[in-house]
Image: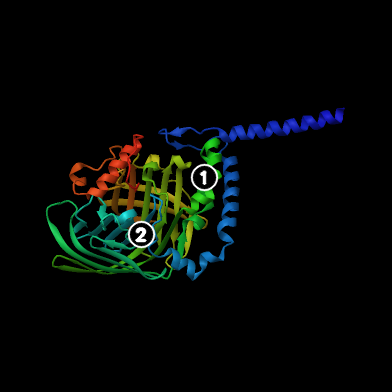
Amino acid sequence: MYLFAAIFGGIAAVLLFIALIVAVLRLKSQLIFDIYPAKGVFYQLKYIIALWLVKRLRNKVYYTKDELNSPEFHAKIDRPQALGDDPQSYDVISFMGANDEGAKLIITLERRRRGVLKACLYLYLPEHGLFCTPKLPDMLYFTTDGKRENDEFKGCGFHVYPEESMRQWRIRYEGEMRNATDERKLLPVRLNMQFTTQAPFFYYNRDLSSAVIADSVAREAWNDAFYNLLKHVPEMVEKRKHYDQSGRLVGEVQLAERCFQLELRGFRDHSFGTERCLSNINRYVYVVLFLEDGSSMVVGNLSQPAFFLSSLKVGYVCTSQGVYEPITDCNYELYTYGEKGTPPRHKNFFVYTAKDKYLVQIEEQQSTVRYMGSDWSSKVYNQFVECTVNGKRGQGITEYLYKNKQSERPESVSASDPEWYKRVKSYERNLSKRKEEQNEVFLF
């Protein structure tokens, strides 16, 4: 009798303890600016659990797969990707570069269904100023009649393509550019550059530090919606592939009557999948720095509360030998840098890897604005900056994305859109109002 009572009492105590643990994990941390969760009282417990789960999952999914290092896999992911039937299919390639003299380059091309191309090109020359493609701050281009797909990063003067998987990409642009502060004067331009590298690639799904993922997850409330999301994490991750690669950008730019030979330390970013929804992103910041000793640094912080990642820090330090050291911690918090909608001109913060600690000091030289999304759902500031990292001087680019509360492309911009695209956007608006239309294809 007493034995059974002791057993049942022990079971009840264990169940009560489990119930208390579950209740603790569900607690919501204090929110900073009603968005960013602070580290709660039980943060350390949640961090330990999250770190164990992340490491276990990644070891099972990535570290046991030799195919990720095979030439076949490299060739498969390092080319323009086929856009599937999913209306959210996307394929994005970006390049950034800078040299010690202060010249800087940004080019981004995003392929979408029906030949839609979202593109930007910035060229910063210290003695001549900042130049950009004429259509900016709008990034929307149309490369087909809407009935055909575009299977290349090509159109409207752009052509970016791989010459050798994970080793060489060609970047070409022939068209016009203007000074970023003067919309009137257009200059003819021909850009022909090559990105080359011997470095491996940094595959975010596999190589991002487990510590920064655990930190972000441990700040969130582990409620029913969170547990439901966990069930679908493997398939959701597979829908979003993203990798970076450090290298060099070398080539020539003919701007009007002037010719510039450029040699830049470079960075390449390629991401593709079926779920790139800017409207779900609250904010993000990316900092890309190129230092005088040949090393580079990528630091970011992403706020996507809908995905239970209200403050996810990402990035790495790449040595001059092309070795990536993932960031394990950083005191760069979004709410302390430009939360009111304007990026700060000066930034100082610490970055940590498993081996080192870095003091990063940044000063803006010039800034510009562009809009992302078919409805201008996001506003992006690009800053062209000088920096010092642990006493080493460098040059770089920062990118601040904000959710655009006035998310609608102005009529003065959208008036020149092709008729088929206007019908699609009208269809989307009707869907948002729970109306239905026939004989149209949902695009974005």
Q: Amino acid under label 1?
A: Asp
Tag 1 residue: 215
Locate residue 32 relative to residue 67 in the image: left or right. left
Q: Is residue 75 left or right of residue 101?
A: right
Q: Which residue is mark 2?
A: 93
Residue 347 % position (x, y): 35, 47
**Which quadrant of the structure image shows residue 384?**
bottom left
Q: Residues within 10 Å of mark 2 (few under 14, many from 20)?
A: many
User: Looking at the picture, how far across and down is residue 246, in whole percent?
Assistant: 40, 64
User: Splitting the image into 4 quarters, where does residue 83 fall?
Assistant: bottom left
Query: How many numbered circles are shown?
Result: 2
Q: How is the image coloured?
A: rainbow
- Residue kind at label 2, given as amino acid type: Ile
* 152 and 114: which is toward the camera: 114
Q: Quadrant of the N terminus?
A: top right
**Against 14, is 299 above or below?**
below
What residue sits 26% from the left and 52% below the top?
A: 139
Instruction: Return the residue nearer the eye: 149 or 8.
Output: 149
How much space separates mark 1 and mark 2, taking CA atoms?
A: 29 Å
Secondary structure beneath dot 2 equals: strand
Q: Secondary structure at mark 1?
A: helix
Residue 373 picture location, percent across and down: 31, 47
Q: Which residue is pictured at 13% across the width and 67% down the height? A: 257
Residue 164 marker: none
Seen as rendered, the residue at the extreme front is: 439
Q: Nearer the viewer, residue 390 or 309?
A: 309
- Report whether residue 340 is seen: no
Q: Indicate whether 89 appears above or below 410.
A: below
